[in-house]
Amino acid sequence: MHKTITLSEYVKKRNGVALGASGSMTNMLKRSLGASSFYLFWQHWNPIWGYYLSRKVMKPLSQLFPIWLAIIMTFAVSGALHDLAITLVKWKLTTFFTPWFSLMGFIVLATKRLGISYREHHWLIRASINSSLIAICLVITRQYA
């Protein structure tokens, strides 16, 4: 049986510093942008959001669907929640983030499946690759959404 990890423990594991500690945002940016793969980027990006997505969305979905589909669906749910937030703020239906985040989910799976790693490269190169993958998904989504 697995011990349930708390939000504080999760953030410390992902950021290297305690929840709300000085340097938390800096550590998140350094670790996520400098991750050696796009899959690992998402392990460090926004750990508070990731904690709840993993427990409330990914875990239940992975019990019903193959893991690859649960990952894409989790990205889609995250996008849909972002769309909902924007819709509520603007009082105008927004459906941009769901396809963008879903596409990033596909890229996560593809790069992981292909074993793409840039571990041997300098942090700046890794950050450029991770940022570029996000930007490419953004451009494709803007083109077709």
Image (tube, rainbow, N blue to C red):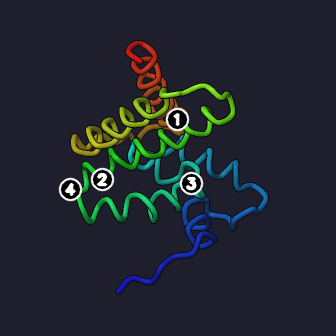
Q: Camera-side residue: 139 or 29?
A: 139
Residue at the spot x=52%, y=35% of the render?
A: 127
Residue 34 rendering spot, x and y as whole percentages: 52, 43
Mark 3 residue type: Trp
Q: Nearer the viewer, mark 1 or mark 3?
A: 3
Q: Camera-side residue: 144 or 106?
A: 144
Q: Is residue 66 left or right of residue 31?
A: left
| SS assignment at label 4 | loop
Residue 66 disc label: 4
Above or below for 109 versus 3: above
Q: Disc 4 vs disc 2: Cβ atoms closer than 8 Å?
A: yes
Residue 127 disc label: 1
Q: Residue furthest top?
A: 143
- In which image quadrant can residue 76 be found? top left
How far apart in space, not on screen, are marks 4 and 2 (Cα)?
Answer: 6 Å
Residue at the spot x=55%, y=60% of the render?
A: 14
Mark 4 residue type: Pro
Above or below for 122 versus 63: above
Q: Residues within 10 Å of mark 3 (few under 14, many from 20)?
A: few
Residue on which the image places disc 2: 70
Q: Residues within 10 Å of mark 2 (few under 14, many from 20)?
A: many
